[in-house]
Amino acid sequence: MREEIVMPAWKLASESVTIKKFNFIPSLLATAYLSFIVLYQVAWSYVYVFHLKDQFFSLVIDFAHTSYFMETVVTIGFFFVLYLVITPIAEGGLIHLISHKDS
């Protein structure tokens, strides 16, 4: 397995600059998405451990009544949809680059 799959994949990933450039945006979006999930989990744990549910929800309600709430929701939604659309396209492009690298 090492000689058939791992070594050619490592060689291709370390030598091909095109693959690194092509995968930058989807990887950046995936990192932002996973960071958002970690932030949510930390906030939930903080609220649960320190019993700050009332204070937390008052902050959420105050934020929901600000003038830039809809802009924030639309921006987060836009980046989430962008992540959902670009990731499969990038993966397909990477598969195409890998399959045409040998020929």
Image (tube, grey):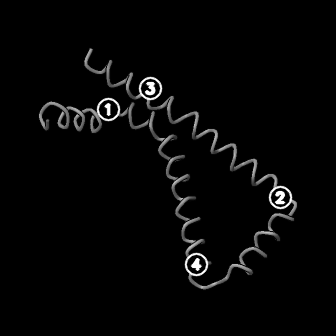
**Residue underneath mark 1:** 16
From mark 2 to mark 1, how far is it between C-alphas? 43 Å
Q: Position of residue 45 (x, y in %)?
A: 55, 75
Q: Earlier in the sequence, mark 3 or mark 2?
A: 2
Q: Earlier in the sequence, mark 3 or mark 4?
A: 4
**Residue underneath mark 2:** 68
Looking at the picture, which amino acid does disc 2 mark?
Tyr
From mark 3 to mark 2, how far is it between C-alphas? 37 Å
User: In the rendered image of this protein, does residue 100 appear above or below residue 20?
Assistant: above
**Residue underneath mark 4:** 46
Count neighbours of disc 3 (C-alpha within 10 A) and say few if under 14, some if 14 to 19, many if 20 or more: some
Q: Residue at x 54, y 46 (%)?
A: 29
User: In the rendered image of this protein, does residue 69 appear above or below residue 77?
Assistant: below
From mark 2 to mark 4, how far is it between C-alphas? 25 Å
Q: Position of residue 102 (x, y in %)?
A: 25, 19
Q: Residue at x 80, y 52 (%)?
A: 71
Task: Looking at the picture, tell me which residue is in the foreground, 62 or 97.
Answer: 62
Q: Is residue 43 left or right of residue 73?
A: left
Q: Is residue 75 left or right of residue 48?
A: right
